[in-house]
């Protein structure tokens, strides 16, 4: 599976961002990527940094401009796309979502971010409802993929659910800027890869938005936690990386964590 991660600067001009995203995806496809992931809410700045009721108007239905444009891009370039967007399911029901689009431009399914933070920089509970579609694993022509969005990565249960669902690679579109997040970025993603015997690909944004500077450093990690490739902390970049799916089998023979799990002993994890 050859994947591409698009780390880009965004503006508040949606059409400009869609044009630039298409160019980056085309670059990845031209270098052989067959699965390409964009960053969290790539069509705008990461607006939840501030509280502004008008910004709820940025939400779009799944057949809106952003997903429709990326479906056309996937069809033209014959790539699978992970398309994060601000979803309007119906008036007042808004989600932080990612559509998974196959190489024919058809929507394979939708992931909605489960864990919704609320802090000085991330006022997300004002904008997003918690996800309600579980942790689906999508069967693509290139392999089985799962998605976690940004804050989901702080919860090991998210990655475990995708691992149990048979994911070979987990994509993590993100908008991370804090010093805390930078210290934990690779560490958490490496932990998910090791604990679940999967490839993990974290896609962060880069540049200055409002008063926040996003640290980039998009990264691809193999099933023993080794960093395969990593992007700049300051520049736009498209990573293109080969994932050897046979590696999963080899690693899981050495570390048979799924065999040795004890779900009968873990009840407290899901207790209220």
Image (spheres, rainbow, N blue to C red):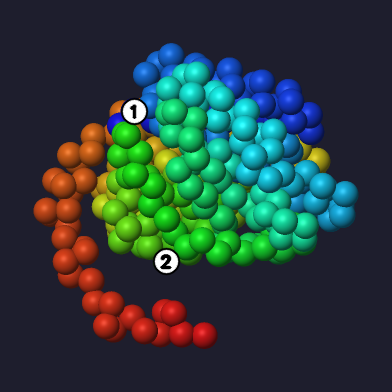
Helix, strand or loop status at disc 1: strand
- Compared with residue 232, is residue 268 higher up or lower down, i.e. above or below? below
- Compared with residue 195, is residue 106 higher up or lower down, i.e. above or below? above
Q: Which circle marks residue 215 in the picture?
A: none
Q: Residue at x 87, y 52 (%)?
A: 52
Residue 179: x %, y % from top left: 62, 50
- Compared with residue 167, is residue 27 higher up or lower down, i.e. above or below? above
Q: Which circle marks residue 157 in the picture?
A: 2
Who comes first in sequence, dot 1 or dot 2? 1
Residue 187: x %, y % from top left: 43, 52
Tally of numbered tags: 2
Residue 247: x %, y % from top left: 19, 41
Determine whether, in the image, residue 1 is placed left or right of residue 33: left
- Closer to the camera, 45 or 55? 55
- Closer to the camera, 54 or 268? 54
Q: Residue at x 62, y 28 (%)?
A: 69
- Compared with residue 26, is residue 251 higher up or lower down, i.e. above or below? below
Q: Which circle marks residue 2 in the picture?
A: 1
Helix, strand or loop status at disc 2: helix
Q: Residue furthest left?
A: 253
Residue 157: x %, y % from top left: 42, 66
- Closer to the camera, 174 or 101? 101
């Amino acid at each position: 599976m050859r994947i591409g991660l698009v780390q880009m600067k965004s503006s508040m001009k949606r059409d400009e961002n869609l044009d630039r995203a298409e160019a980056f995806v085309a670059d990845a496809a031209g270098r052989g990527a067959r699965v390409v992931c964009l960053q969290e809410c790539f069509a705008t700045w990461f607006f939840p940094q501030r509280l502004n009721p008008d910004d709820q108007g940025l939400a779009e239905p799944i057949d809106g401009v952003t997903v429709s444009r990326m479906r056309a891009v996937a069809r033209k370039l014959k790539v699978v796309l992970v398309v994060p967007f601000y979803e309007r399911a119906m008036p007042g029901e808004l989600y932080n979502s990612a559509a998974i689009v196959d190489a024919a431009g058809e929507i394979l399914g939708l992931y909605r971010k489960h864990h919704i933070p609320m802090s000085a920089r991330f006022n997300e509970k004002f904008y997003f409802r918690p996800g309600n579609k579980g942790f689906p694993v999508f069967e693509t022509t290139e392999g089985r993929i799962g998605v976690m969005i940004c804050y989901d990565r702080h919860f090991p249960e998210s990655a475990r659910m995708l691992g149990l669902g048979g994911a070979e690679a987990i994509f993590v579109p993100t908008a991370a800027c804090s010093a805390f997040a930078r210290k934990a970025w690779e560490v958490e993603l490496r932990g998910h890869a090791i604990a679940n015997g999967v490839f993990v690909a974290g896609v962060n944004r880069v540049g200055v938005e409002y008063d926040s500077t996003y640290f980039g450093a998009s990264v691809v990690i193999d099933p023993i936690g080794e960093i395969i490739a990593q992007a700049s902390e300051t520049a736009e970049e498209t990573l293109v990386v080969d994932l050897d799916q046979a590696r999963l089998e080899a690693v899981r023979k050495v570390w048979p964590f799924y065999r040795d799990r004890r779900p009968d002993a873990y009840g407290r994890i899901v207790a209220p």
